[in-house]
Amino acid sequence: MQLTRLISKSFKIGFPVQDSFCIFLLLFTDNNFDMKILKGKTFVITGASKGIGRALAEALSLLNTHLALIARSKTELEQVQQLAVANGSNCIIFCGDITDEQFVNESIKEVQRQFGRINVLINNAGFGIFKPTEDISVAEWDDVFATNTKGTFLMTKAVIPFMKAQQAGHIINIASDVAKRVFSGGSLYCASKYAQDAFSMAIRKELRPFKVKVSVVYSGLVDSSFHAEPQGDNSHEQWLKNEDMANAIIYIAAQPAHVVIDELMIHPVFQDY
């Protein structure tokens, strides 16, 4: 099987392909789940240098896709690009700030120029500040909203004309389960994610007549670099892995044209919601 050979090739060249995604690929291939639907598609991923974004880029690179990766860290982006190309996918990188409208617009135009099409945008970049409300500075409030909400807006706004013109496309926003609930000390982060979710719901109605899908993923605890403890910390043992999130996102993206998964809530089993 070609897919098995591709996975084997990735192991032979010495790059770290995650076992969980290989199993995911083989499971759905054996059950006639058409992963070939993603072949040749162009994916734009923000926050692609680490965590969920990197795991997603690594997984998609096994499927012969076109990848456009955006993040602030050039060194880490180059590492992901090297892996993606070695796995047989085309990959371009953009190092910059998604809160900068000029950077966003120029990057998306370049993706369209090089690949001729933008099939899927994954708004994954985000961060949080957690403290009592009276301790939050205006600058902190603006920074979190700039990345989590404004960044999603700017990236989405930039791809909409291309997706409308091609009468197809998919925008997948990585939110959080705190877009549906709140907690003490989370007023800033929760507010930014509620805003991102409301934006997603509105554009879903706006874009559906143009055959553009909008999906939102609401995740619980994920063992990523997002948290105060480092990725892989013992306290994260029962949390979702970045590869779990990548698998879920790819499942959403791999649905046939007439199917859209509007919302997906995902938690580790131990986490009460």
Image (cartoon, rainbow, N blue to C red):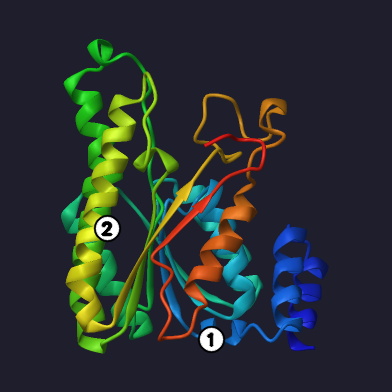
| Front one among 184 and 109 | 184
Q: Amino acid at mark 2?
A: Ser
Q: Label 2: how many residues lie within 10 Å, few (<14), some (14-19) or many (20+)? A: many
What is the three-letter code of the residue carrying label 1? Ile
Query: Which x, y percent locates residue 241?
Result: 64, 46
In this rendering, does residue 43 appear at all? yes
Occupied quadrant, residue 122 = bottom left
Residue displayed at 60% across by 35% down: 271
Quadrant (top left/top right/bottom left/bottom right) for the N terminus: bottom right
57 with respect to 109 (left or right): right
Q: Secondary structure at mark 2?
A: helix
Query: Does 70 sit left or right of 105 as displayed?
Result: right
Q: Quadrant of residue 172?
A: bottom left
Q: Residue at x 28, y 42 (%)?
A: 194
Whichever of labels 2 and 1 marks the residue nearer the N terminus, that label is: 1
Residue 43 lies, in percent from the top left, at 43, 71
The reply to whether dot 2 and dot 1 touch (C-beta < 8 Å) is no
Q: Distance from label 2 to label 1 (Cα)? A: 24 Å
Report the residue at 29% width, 25% height from top. 187
Q: Residue furthest top?
A: 134
Residue 99 seen by the camera:
no
What secondary structure is marked by label 1? helix
- For label 1, the residue is 37
Can you tell which mark lies on residue 200? 2
Q: Is residue 116 above or below residue 25?
A: below
Left or right, residue 233 beside residue 249: right
Q: Nearer the viewer, mark 2 or mark 1?
A: 2
Which label belongs to residue 19? none
Q: Pointer 1: residues within 10 angstroms few (<14), some, or many (20+)?
A: some
Image spot of residue 220 (x, y percent): 52, 41
In the rendered image, residue 250, in percent from the top left (x then y), is placed at 54, 68
